Amino acid sequence: MTLGVKLGVNESLEIWAPRAQEVAVEHGGVLYPARRCERGYYEVDAPPIGSDYYLVLDGRRRPDPRSALQPHGVHGPSRRIAHDFAWQDGEFRAPPLASGVIYELHVGTFTAEGTFAAATDRLADLAELGVTHVELMPVASFPGQHGWGYDGVCLWAPHPAYGTPDELKRLVARAHALGLAVLLDVVYNHLGPDGNYLAELGPYFTERYRTPWGSAVNLDEAGSDEVRKFFVDNACMWLRDYHFDGLRLDAVHAFADRSARHFLEQLSEAVAELSGALGRPLVLIGESDLNDPRLVRERVASGYGLDAQWSDDLHHALHAALTGERSGYYADFGALADIVRTLREGYAYAGRYSRFRERTHGRPLAGVSSNRLLGYLQTHDQVGNRARGERIAMLTSPGRARIGAAIALCAPCVPMLFQGEEWAASSPFLYFTDHQSPELAQAVREGRQAEFAAFGWAPQDVPDPQAPDTFRASVLDWSERQREPHAGMLQFYRALIALRRSSRDLQTGDLQRVEAACDDARGWLSLRRGAVTLQANLGAAKVVLPAPPGRCVLAHPSVPEHEAGGVALLPDGCALWLAE
């Protein structure tokens, strides 16, 4: 059977707790001892649907690690629910990632209400924008009311401050009715420090490896079969019971696994089997900074079989060129040639020496479609992991922000937007927490200050993550979309997305068909993908470039002037041409 607690056909709970001597379930004021089984398992009759209960491990009350709902917080009792939602999306099939445009959002700051229900009411706006996939940042229960979600500890239970399980299902159902696929960000490389009781049940963690969050998840030592199964089952639960169309896997480079069959390979196999059983496509997207194509190679080609991965190189190359920043990992970027290399090869670092890392980094994306990479100008990480959470439009001119958007949406990878990017939202996206432990809250404050020191930010420039104002400042103001300069930026993004989705040339993942060039001294860059040509001027003076075939379909600040030998672009200007 599986680890944690799983309901069987006889309505029993099976609890994997090899470190406990006595296990029981408490509900309705009564303690029900569990029967000891083999290999560290215990079995007990399940509480009734809708009832609250605790696991009792050697006399200690603990929430169920597979709890479907934690209505009283991550330290409180668990609640059984019935996954009997009246789904009506049987005909929906998620569009392929290759033709997709993804939109990342954080439920707590996406709307003023910060709930699943309020986010549901905004999905029509995203459909009108033209995106195809909505990606939710983690929604698994974490301590306090608000946070990014990467400190989740009850991985099977939607965060109660966002709403109920059925309200999350209504969000997915509404998205499907609008033609939008929904992806969920899940965190399997660590659990948060507050409310994490897994180590009391069994060997979920190992001291053999260390991660930025402490002990690594045990994927290859004694007991790791059950640990791996716990996370695989969790992934399948979100896809099956909540009808998500795919998962984004946080920081997969932090998985320490020397097994012959890597955890990611096992997970991709399980999701492929579930996809076949459900009769609908399901995808896995990994976040990784390794620039290693093995993540997205097919399993038959000795890869891990993920469908795509986040690729930071395009972001870093764009950000450094647009803003001039060179601190931290931006030290490896800054030249327009870095953007061109990423457009041509998928990775900017594919076996090159990295000054930031002081070693050779990455390997070529040979034989792999560039549609296996996600490219972006902004993400929650790259905005939120700044001292003041500035978006790109706060760091550079409106014209340069448009250039970045145009390159990202015309690049040979799957484009992704971060909430509010499309209208140059004035709200930052800061790092915010609501830890209930004063000691933990202080440790987080000090940790953020130390982390930002590498980028040259002074401690006084780092907002207090625990301050309520830090959270409130990050909430989107949807009304500003009607005002300039936000309305103009929104119109520009809509046109870009429409072009992306209507052009087969922009959806191909064949890097051999990418033509890109630049002149760092003069500051111009060009990208041609079939019938679509993008020209941009990041220099300080007007430049004259060869006139591409076709007509200008999108330009900023104005349609380029025809001059002898070509067309002229003003500084911070860009233009898109479409051959008829």
Image: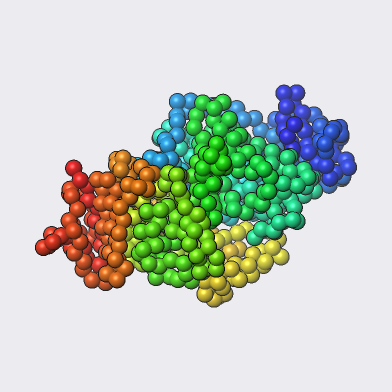
User: Relative to 294, does residue 329 appear above or below in the rendering?
Assistant: below
Residue 557, given in percent of the width and then of the height, sits at 23, 61
- The structure residue drawn at horizontal position 51% and vertical position 44%, both measured from the top left corner, is 296
Image quarter hosting the N terminus: top right
Residue 97, given in percent of the width and then of the height, sits at 43, 40
- The structure residue drawn at horizontal position 57% and vertical position 60%, both measured from the top left corner, is 432
Residue 310, given in percent of the width and then of the height, sits at 49, 51
3 or 264, nearer to the observer:
264
Image quarter hosting the C terminus: top left
In this view of the protein, can residue 136 be seen by the observer? no
Residue that sits furthest to the right in the current view: 21
230 or 222, nearer to the observer:
222
In this view of the protein, can residue 431 be seen by the observer? yes
Residue 302 relative to residue 209: left or right: left
Residue that sits furthest to the top in the current view: 10
Residue 62 relative to residue 242: left or right: right
In this rendering, the count of numbered labels is 0
90 or 33, nearer to the observer:
90
User: Relative to 575, does residue 372 appear above or below in the rendering?
Assistant: above
For residue 47, which quarter of the picture? Answer: top right
- The structure residue drawn at horizontal position 64% and vertical position 70%, both measured from the top left corner, is 446
517 or 452, nearer to the observer:
517
Q: How is the image coloured?
A: rainbow
Residue 576, given in percent of the width and then of the height, sits at 25, 52
- The structure residue drawn at horizontal position 43% and vertical position 66%, both measured from the top left corner, is 333
For residue 499, which quarter of the picture? Answer: top left
User: Relative to 312, does residue 293 appear above or below in the rendering?
Assistant: above
